Image: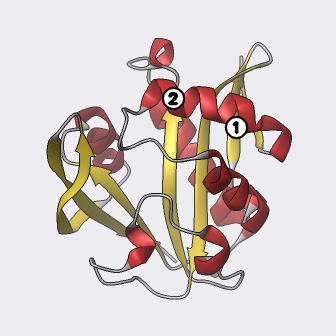
Amino acid sequence: MEIIRKATKYDINAIMNIEKEAFSEGIKENKDVFLDRIESFSDGFFILEDKNKAIGYFSSELWNSVPQKGDSCFSLNHSALKNHKKEGTILYISSIAILNEYKGTGLGYRFFYKSVEKIMKSFPQIKEIVLLVNEIWIPALHIYKKCGFIEYGRIQNFFSSAGIKTDGILMRKSVDL
């Protein structure tokens, strides 16, 4: 049975193992970024466990407004400490990943949905949710569309891995009041 719990700094090695497996070079974010995210918004950073093993993570931030597509808020390895605003009305989902062996099981969708649900219950001021996803991550796009997200922009050549550049798709969802 899977458990979703808040991340702590003691989860950093497990988070980095998941990050290493889930993302290729050029897309992986660094350890300090994740520690920064845990410190700035621990209520929006979750670990997914199966049999006491961390198998996924979900990180997010609260912002005061939706930045323009060229804003540094959307850059990989950006500072959550700089961008996070405790009273923000925009939930930005900065990263989600699960280990490869759990992909294709429906677990990614459930983890994403439950994580957002937990945050929404704790932060009723949230009016909108935004995220950025690689155009080639079809399973992730499917999850987000299934949850009601729509594309509202693109950042050309945002992602770069093995010399191949791909667009970042900006997606948003208004929160039903």
Label 1 Cα crowd, 10 Å radius (few <14 / some 14-19 / many 20+): many
- Mark sitting on residue 92: none
Its colouring scheme is secondary structure
Which amino acid type is shown beneath numbered disc 2?
Lys
Could you say which is closer to the camera, residue 126 or residue 164?
A: 164
N-term mark: 1 or 2: 2
Q: Is residue 53 placed above or below 19 in the rendered structure?
A: above
Q: Answer with left or right where residue 35 lies relative to residue 92.
A: right
Classify residue 83 by image quadrant: bottom right
Q: Is residue 95 placed above or below 83 in the rendered structure?
A: above
* Secondary structure at numbered mark 1: strand
Label 2 Cα crowd, 10 Å radius (few <14 / some 14-19 / many 20+): some
Q: Residue at x 65, y 35 (%)?
A: 15
- Mark sitting on residue 20: 2
Q: Tell me where residue 122 appears, x and y as whole percent.
A: 74, 66
Q: Residue at x 62, y 34 (%)?
A: 16
| Residue situated furthest front in the rendering | 163
- Mark sitting on residue 47: 1
Which amino acid type is shown beneath numbered disc 1?
Ile
* Secondary structure at numbered mark 2: helix
Could you say which is closer to the camera, residue 62 or residue 32?
A: 32
Q: Residue at x 72, y 31 (%)?
A: 13
Q: Residue at x 48, y 32 (%)?
A: 108
Could you say which is closer to the camera, residue 7 or residue 176?
A: 7
Q: Is residue 17 something one can see in this rendering?
A: yes
Q: Is residue 4 something one can see in this rendering?
A: no
Q: Tell me where residue 33 appears, x and y as whole percent.
A: 62, 56
- For the residues labelled 1 and 2, the Cα–Cα distance comes to 16 Å
Query: Which is more foreground, mark 1 or mark 2?
Result: 2
Q: Tell me where residue 5 appears, x and y as whole percent.
A: 78, 40
Q: Is residue 41 placed above or below 48 in the rendered structure?
A: below
Q: How many marks?
A: 2
